[in-house]
Image: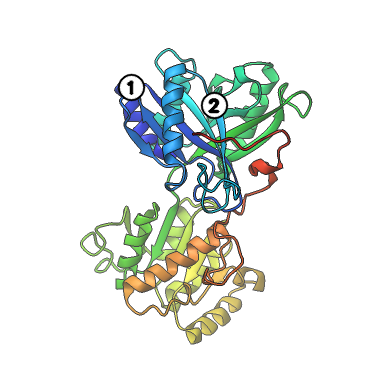
């Protein structure tokens, strides 16, 4: 739901009643991951998507029904060879969708409203909702913020709220959305509950070092991929707003000095396009020791070998060198700055989601990758669940 927070937050401000359908679990090949949402207001306006089109009509009808009767519902959609005309996913996957009404008189509305407002402002927040368990608890929600404050509750045993708040904080620290199984008393004992935790975190950072033509194209692609993009170069004549109008920040400083003082995390990507040893070596020496998601450096294979020798000479270990993506990007045959930017972005995406970068044609690997996926996110691993259909 937090993936459409900006639009939904406006609906809340306008006093609209709506129902939101959220993907809570997937199995096999499915087009959207947990957290993807479709919302429908009382006038029939719809925003978002849960399946890329396969089951949108049926989910739309579920949202309208939830608005009418005020009850949350959990529904499964899958593909049936026996009934090819049934509502389902043509890709062969299985998705479970929670539909929750958000109306003026509902106790969950203030919690959802606060979560949507935080996400719309770009603040770190996690929303935990019960998606499987006793009917009276279905849809109950608690909001956890980065400073440890919280709002709302799940009902039932007090220890349940404490445990879920702690788990949600851990999900938030990792910037992860997914499900967890827990007992109704906050432990592994008692009737099992399934809780969906949606994390909303600020945009990940892309720092592009080297204010060259290739960097301008990469900035545009980075913004398209929803990164907060910074361009850094020690040469003020090149690091200008005129050359990089799409960048969020432009920094004139030696790259390694800027990297020493700026904040990075496990989602940050560093793209070194300076192609000059006096910039590259001190910068990469630091970058390869930071807990970031990706470090790539531009250059020919000859440049790469020479740069590695220079890095070894200043104490960079083989283990640290193994983190370096160089020459940067995937082999797309790229030549122009725009093609090269696409090559770099493709490698970043593959590294983030565990993709191979190989053509899908003729391959037998999953189309959709999730490095965090485990059996808790697969609805087919849960006892007692069944495939439902909506006429």
Residue 223 found in image quarter = bottom left
Task: Determine the image quadrant of residue 171.
Answer: top right
Residue 272 appears anywhere in the view? no
Tell me the SS state at disc 1: loop
Residue 73 is marked as 2
In front of the other: 255 or 5: 5
The residue under the point 52% across, 84% down is 306
| Residue in front for this viewpoint, 390 or 188 | 390
Which element type, helix, strand or loop, lies under badge 2? strand
Furthest residue to the right?
189
Circle 1 packing at 10 Å, graded few (<14), some (14-19), many (20+), is some
Q: Are marks 2 and 1 in contact (CB under 8 Å)?
A: no
Judged by depth in the image, the label closer to the viewer, 2 or 1, is 2
What x and y, as percent, mark residue 152?
53, 19
Tag shown at residue 16? 1
Q: Is residue 253 left or right of residue 378?
A: left
**Residue 167 point in image, percent of width and height:** 64, 34
N-terminal-most mark, 2 or 1: 1
Query: Who's the residue at 45% across and 78% down the image?
Result: 277
Residue ID at (43%, 40%): 56
Residue 321: image x %, image y %? 60, 72
Q: From what the image shows, is residue 338 above or below residue 202?
A: below
Q: Position of residue 280 (x, y in %)?
A: 46, 73
Q: Residues within 10 Å of mark 2 (few under 14, many from 20)?
A: many
Q: Residue furthest left?
A: 242
Distance from Cα at disc 2 to Cα at disc 1: 20 Å
Is 168 positioned to the left or the right of 275 in the image? right
Q: Nearer the viewer, residue 283 or 67?
A: 67
């Amino acid at each position: 739901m937090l993936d459409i927070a900006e639009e939904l937050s406006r609906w809340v401000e306008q006093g609209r009643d709506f129902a939101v359908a959220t993907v809570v679990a997937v199995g096999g090949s499915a087009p959207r991951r947990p957290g993807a949402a479709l919302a429908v207001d009382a006038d029939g306006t719809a925003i978002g998507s849960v399946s890329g089109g396969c089951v949108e009509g049926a989910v739309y009808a579920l949202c309208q029904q939830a608005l009418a009767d005020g009850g949350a519902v959990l529904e499964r959609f899958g593909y049936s060879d026996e009934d090819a005309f049934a509502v389902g996913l043509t890709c062969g996957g299985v998705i479970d969708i929670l539909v929750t009404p958000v109306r003026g008189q509902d106790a969950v509305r203030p919690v959802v409203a606060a979560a949507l407002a935080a996400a719309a402002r770009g603040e770190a927040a996690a929303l935990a909702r019960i998606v499987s368990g006793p009917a009276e608890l279905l849809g109950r929600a608690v909001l956890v913020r980065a400073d440890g404050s919280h709002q709302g509750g799940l009902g039932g045993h007090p220890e349940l709220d404490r445990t879920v708040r702690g788990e949600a904080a851990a999900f938030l620290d990792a910037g992860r959305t997914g499900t967890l199984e827990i007992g109704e008393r906050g432990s592994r004992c008692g009737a099992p509950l399934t809780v969906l935790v949606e994390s909303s975190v600020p945009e990940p950072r892309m720092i592009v070092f080297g204010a060259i033509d290739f960097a301008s194209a990469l900035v545009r692609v980075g913004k398209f991929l929803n990164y907060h993009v910074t361009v850094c170069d020690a040469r003020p004549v090149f690091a200008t707003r005129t050359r990089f109008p799409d960048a969020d920040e432009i920094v004139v400083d030696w790259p390694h000095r800027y990297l020493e003082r700026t904040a990075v995390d496990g989602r940050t990507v560093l793209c070194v396009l300076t192609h000059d040893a006096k910039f590259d070596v001190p910068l990469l020496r630091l970058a390869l020791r930071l807990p970031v998601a990706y470090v790539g450096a531009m250059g020919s294979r000859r440049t790469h070998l020479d740069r590695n020798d220079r890095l070894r000479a200043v104490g960079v270990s083989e283990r640290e060198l193994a983190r370096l993506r160089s020459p940067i990007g995937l082999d797309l045959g790229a030549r122009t700055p725009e093609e090269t930017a696409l090559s770099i972005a493709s490698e970043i995406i593959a590294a983030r989601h565990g993709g191979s970068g190989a053509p899908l044609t003729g391959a037998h690997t999953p189309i959709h990758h999730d490095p965090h996926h485990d059996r808790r996110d697969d609805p087919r691993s849960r006892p007692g669940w069944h495939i439902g259909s909506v006429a």
